[in-house]
Image: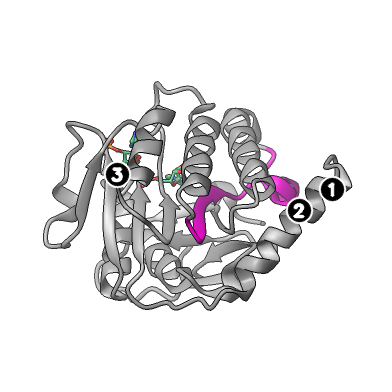
Amino acid sequence: MTSNPTDAPPARWLRQLALGLALLLPLSASAAEVLVFGGTGQLGAEVARALHRAGHTVTVFHREGSGLERLQGVPVKFVTGDATREADVRAAFTARRYEVAVNALGKRGSDPAAFYETTQRAITAGAKAGGVRQVILHSSVGAGESRAIYPESRWPQMAEVLTAKDVAERELMASGVPYTIIRNAVLRNDAPGATERAELSTDQRRFGAVTRSGLGRLTADCALKADCLGRIFHAVDPQVALPAATRGH
Ligand SMILES: NC(=O)c1ccc[n+]([C@@H]2O[C@H](COP(=O)([O-])OP(=O)(O)OC[C@H]3O[C@@H](n4cnc5c(N)ncnc54)[C@H](OP(=O)(O)O)[C@@H]3O)[C@@H](O)[C@H]2O)c1
C-alpha cells in the first residue's frame, strides 16, 4: 500500500486502524451486493457479467438514456443517476445496502479530466456513508508510483487524465474506506476464440496489456477477498500484445 507522506500521524493511524478492522472482519466472497458504476460501458459490462457469474447480486448505476445493450442476458438491477452529481451517488448508496462498489467509469471525450476525481470522490463519500466493505477502483498505469514507467511520448496527451486518476486513488486511500485499486496500461477487447490469462501483480513497474473480459474476471476474483484489500495491482495478460508505441516498458 502506498502511504501519503503529507498525512499528519493521527489521521494516518486512524486510517490504518480502520483498514485493520476491515481486514479482521470475516470476508465472505459469496453472494455480495455489488454496485457497479460504468456498468453499461465496455469494461463495466464485463465486470458486471463476471460478478454475476461468480454468484454476486449486481446493480448497475447508469444515466437516464444510457444504452443497456452490453448487459443483455446479464440479470442485473439498475439505479439511475449521474456519477458527477454527488447527490445522485449518495442516493444510490442510501436506497440499498451494498457490500462492494466498483468504479469502472470512463469519461466522454468532452468531459474534463477532473471527471475522474469528482466521480471517485462522490463514490468514496457514498460508500463511506453506506458502510460499504470494499471499493474497487479501476485506475490507470501512470498514476502514483507507476508514473515512472509511463511512456514519456504519451505523457503530454495523457497528463491531465492520469493526474486526475492519481488524485482519485490518493483520496480513496486516505478515506479509510477499504479499497482495492486495479490499474491497467492498455485495455483490449478479446480476440475471437482467445482465452484470457489476466493476472494481478503488485509490481507497480509492470506494464502490459489486458483484455476487458480478463479485467472483469479479476475484479470478481477480488470482491470481498481479504488479500485484495488495501492494495494496488497492475492487471496484465502476458499473452496480449502491446501496441508498438508502448513497447519497451
Ligand atoms: N488503457 C487503455 O488502453 C484504456 C482504453 C480505454 C479505456 N480505459 C480506461 O478504462 C475505463 C473504462 O473504459 P471503457 O472502455 O469501459 O469506457 P466506456 O465504454 O466509454 O464506458 C464508460 C462508462 O462510464 C459511464 N459514464 C460516463 N459518464 C458518466 C456519468 N456522468 N454518470 C454515470 N455514468 C457515466 C458510461 O455510461 P453511458 O453508457 O451512459 O455512456 C459507461 O458506462 C476508463 O477509466 C478508461 O480511462 C483505458
Total marks shown come to 3
Quadrant holding ligand 1?
top left
**Toward the viewer: 82 or 94?**
94
**Toward the viewer: 162 or 121?**
121
Q: Is residue 243 visible?
A: no
Q: Are marks 2 and 1 in contact (CB under 8 Å)?
A: yes
Report the Cα–Cα distance between label 3 and label 1: 35 Å
Q: Is residue 72 magenta?
A: no
Label 3 environment density (alpha carbons within 10 Å; few <14, some 14–19, many ≥20)? many
Q: Nearer the viewer, mark 3 or mark 2?
A: 2
Quarter where residue 16 is shown = bottom right
Give the magenta part as a residue range: 132-152
Residue 175 picture location, percent across and down: 64, 46
Instruction: Name the residue: 39% across, 21% down.
Output: 110
Label 1 environment density (alpha carbons within 10 Å; few <14, some 14–19, many ≥20)? few
Left or right, 217 with reference to 127: left
Q: Residue at label 2?
A: 14
Q: Residue at label 3?
A: 61
Q: Nearer the viewer, mark 3 or mark 1?
A: 1
Q: What type is the residue that disc 2 sits on? A: Leu
Q: Is mark 3 within 8 Å of ligand 1?
A: yes
Q: Earlier in the sequence, mark 3 or mark 2?
A: 2
Instruction: Name the residue: 43% across, 63% down.
Output: 215
